[in-house]
Every structure is written in structure tokens, then in C-alpha cells.
Image (cartoon, rainbow, N blue to C red):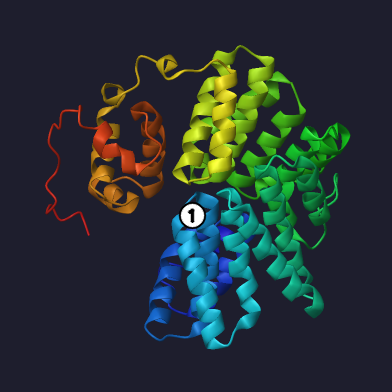
């Protein structure tokens, strides 16, 4: 059913239907399919179109941006959403944009801001009986607590969304805090509670909802189990390019799995996961998580000289080098894909693998890193494939 719905989006012109399809697929992690029509409505709203549809489109874009690591854009659009709500007389929806801002503030280490925004949501929601908004506010509180190493507080906030061993009925948002609860439970010695929650996740078959949910389940299983089968499953998930799209959560799973390997296996096994986690967090400017990954790397005895001898520009494949050059020139993943006949997701996966090889964490470092790489020539810009 979801596949049939999203296939209609590119040709859909009815703004109400676009918003409703996007909303219907939120918990299936299919918002990427509605990005193009959502942007159409944002542009229409900026030119004086219906503010209600403008707000709905911004909600979907903000959430997809948060989940996929486009945090700068998410913050910008969340502020735009709040402005539209205030100026167009839709105060009810402003809490959702505060929620998005709070999540990113928590992820980037602006803990006071994150907690203040979550407070604003609850102070507005509770007197009005908007329990869903108050539930959403628990997530940035939990994330801010984890970023500060306060796993006791993180556990209580996550458990308030859904008790250990239970996925709360009629509260699908509790699936977004599953990993927070399991990790916080393990870090505070609540091993039975963590295992019970993983069992609840399995029983509900959350992995069937989306690749992101499958990744979260695999990461949670790896936290509570030492079985080889579980390790193989999480490693396979992390190697799948499809999981790279979920940048924050894939980086978190890499971090926790790397932390576990550091304690239970030779350090060399942990390092690739910790390096990839550090680089993923750095690309989002998620500083508390970058520092945590750095600390774990230091604990493995890692030094920059420990990088494999195949790192550097000379280690890139021809396609990786071509994609890196285009990205360094400022082209978006979509524009690169159009030139090279690749999907934007494939381009993103190539860049994700390229950054560690070049010793950079974002596009900003590509130009300097590529100076030693000979340019074999590229397709001219006016070949008719760029737009």
C-alpha cells in the first residue's frame, strides 16, 4: 500500500493529498519520497500560497532532514516553520518545530537550549491536554541527557515514552526512542529491562517497518547480546549502503558497537567502527558524540599514523575520485547523480566511504584533500545532463 501511494507523489498536484500521503508514511520512514512535492509546496508558500500546506511540508522536510543528517537545513526550516505559524495564525503547530530544533540542539551539545525548547513544548501542551506533544518533548530531553553522559536521566525520559519491555499502544513515536532506552538501560545496569525492550521490538517486528528500524533493532540487539549471529547481523546492516542514509542513527550504532568491541575484542576490530562514527557525527557537527568517539578511539591506542596505508587520495576508486571532485566544486548529490547517471543515495554512499579515506569529515575538507589527486578530466558541464 505504501509503495503504491508514494509512486503517485511525483505527478500529484493536490497539496492536501501530498501532505496526507507524507503523513501516512512518516513511521515507515518514507519521507524521502515526498521531498520533491514538499519543496514545491514550500516554494508556493513562500510566494503567498496556503500557509497550512506550507507548514505541513516544512514539518515533513524538517523530520527527514533530522533523520538523514541535514541538520543545518533542518534548523533553518524549523525556524521558518515557527515564523509561519506565528504570522499566519497557526500557533498549534509551532510545538513541532520547537521539537525539531530541540533534537538538533541536543545532538550538537547545546543542552540548555534543547532543554528550554522541550520545556516550552510541555508548558504549552500539558494545560491544553495535548499529550502527544508532551510525549515528543521527552525525546530531546533523553538525547540531551545522553549527550552529557547522564544515562540515568536518559533512561527515565525514554521510559516515560514507553516502559521497558513495552511498545506503547497508539504512540508510534515511542519507536524513535527505543535505542535510547536500551542503551541507557545497559549503561545504568538495568540489563533485564534492556533485554525485555529488545524482545518487545522483535515481537512487534519493528524491522519490517523500514531499513532504519531494522538498523535500530540490530544495534539494540548488539548492545544486549554477545552472540556471533547478532554481531554478524549488525555488521551486515552497517555495511549496507541503504543504512548510510540514516546518518545520526547509523553513527550511533557504529559508536556503541565499536565501544563494545573495544571491551571484548582486539582494538583493531573496534577502530573502523569508531572512526566511521566519529566522521559521521562530525559531518553533522554533533560535537558531544564526536568527542565520545574520539575518547573511545584513544582508548584503543589509536593514533593518526594507525590509518591503513591505503588511505589518502590514491586509495580512491575512479568513481569515488570523480564524485569527490564534483562535491568539492559544490555540486549537490542530486546534481552529481544526474551527471554520472547514479541515484543521489548512491552518490551519498560513495561520499560516506570517501571521507575517511581522505581523512576529512565533510565536504568542506575535500578541496584541500584532493590537491594531490591528478584530475583525469571530466565530462563538460554543458553536456546537457546537469540542471
Q: Residue 321's spot in the image, x, y percent?
A: 26, 33
Q: Residues within 10 Å of mark 1 (few under 14, many from 20)?
A: many
User: Residue at position x 86%, y 38% from top?
Assistant: 193
Let me know if residue 8 appears in the view: no
Q: Residue lying farthest right?
A: 192
Above or below — where is 197 with respect to 139? above
In this view, the residue in front, 333 or 188, is 188
Q: Quadrant of the C terminus?
A: bottom left
Residue 386: x %, y % from top left? 21, 55
| Residue drawn at (46%, 68%) of the image | 9
The percent coordinates of residue 189 (x first, y second) are 84, 32
- Front residue (pair 325, 243): 325
Vertical position of residue 38 compared to residue 234: above or below: below
The x, y position of residue 349, in whole percent, is 41, 39
Q: How many marks?
A: 1
Q: Which residue is mark 1?
A: 71
Residue 101 visible in the displayed image: yes
Is residue 77 found left or right of 250 in the rendered image?
Answer: left
Quadrant of the image for the N terminus? Answer: bottom right
Residue at x 60%, y 38% (from the top left corner) = 252
Residue at position x 56%, y 82% from top?
86
Residue farthest along the front direction in this orientation: 112
Secondary structure of the residue carrying tag 1 is: helix
Amino acid at each position: 500500500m505504501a509503495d503504491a501511494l508514494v509512486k503517485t507523489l511525483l505527478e500529484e498536484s493536490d497539496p492536501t493529498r501530498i501532505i496526507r500521503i507524507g503523513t501516512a508514511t512518516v513511521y515507515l520512514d518514507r519521507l524521502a519520497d515526498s521531498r520533491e512535492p514538499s519543496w514545491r509546496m514550500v516554494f508556493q508558500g513562500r510566494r503567498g500560497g496556503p500557509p497550512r500546506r506550507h507548514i505541513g511540508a516544512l514539518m515533513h522536510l524538517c523530520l527527514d532532514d533530522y533523520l538523514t543528517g541535514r541538520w543545518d537545513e533542518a534548523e533553518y526550516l524549523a525556524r521558518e516553520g515557527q515564523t509561519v505559524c506565528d504570522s499566519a495564525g497557526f500557533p498549534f503547530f509551532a510545538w513541532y518545530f520547537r521539537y525539531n530544533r530541540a533534537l538538533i540542539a541536543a545532538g550538537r551539545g547545546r543542552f540548555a537550549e534543547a532543554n528550554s525548547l522541550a520545556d516550552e513544548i510541555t508548558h504549552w501542551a500539558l494545560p491544553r491536554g495535548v499529550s502527544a506533544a508532551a510525549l515528543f518533548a521527552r525525546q530531546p530531553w533523553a538525547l540531551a541527557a545522553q549527550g552529557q553522559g547522564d544515562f540515568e536521566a536518559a533512561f527515565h525520559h525514554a521510559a516515560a515514552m514507553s516502559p521497558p519491555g513495552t511498545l506503547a499502544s497508539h504512540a508510534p513515536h515511542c519507536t524513535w526512542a527505543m535505542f535510547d532506552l536500551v542503551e541507557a538501560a545497559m549503561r545504568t545496569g538495568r540489563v533485564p529491562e534492556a533485554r525485555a525492550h529488545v524482545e518487545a521490538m522483535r515481537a512487534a517486528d519493528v524491522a519490517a517497518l523500514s531499513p532504519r528500524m531494522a538498523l535500530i533493532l540490530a544495534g539494540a540487539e548488539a548492545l544486549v547480546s554477545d552472540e556471533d549471529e547478532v554481531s554478524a547481523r549488525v555488521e551486515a546492516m552497517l555495511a549496507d549502503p541503504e543504512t548510510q542514509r540514516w546518518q545520526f542513527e547509523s553513527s550511533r550504532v557504529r559508536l556503541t558497537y565499536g565501544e563494545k568491541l573495544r571491551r571484548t575484542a582486539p582494538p583493531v576490530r573496534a577502530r573502523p567502527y569508531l572512526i566511521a562514527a566519529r566522521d559521521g557525527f562530525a559531518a553533522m557537527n554533533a560535537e558531544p558524540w564526536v568527542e565520545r568517539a574520539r575518547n573511545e578511539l584513544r582508548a584503543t591506542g589509536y593514533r593518526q599514523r594507525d590509518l591503513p596505508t591505503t588511505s589518502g587520495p590514491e586509495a580512491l576508486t575512479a568513481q569515488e575520485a570523480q564524485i569527490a571532485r564534483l562535491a568539492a566544486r559544490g555540486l549537490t548529490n542530486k546534481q552529481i547523480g544526474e551527471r554520472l547517471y547514479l541515484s543521489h543515495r548512491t552518490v551519498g554512499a560513495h561520499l560516506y566511504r570517501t571521507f575517511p579515506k581522505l581523512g576529512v569529515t565533510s565536504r568542506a575538507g575535500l578541496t584541500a584533500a584532493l590537491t594531490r589527486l591528478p584530475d583525469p578530466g571530466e565530462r563538460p558541464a554543458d553536456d546537457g545532463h546537469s540542471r
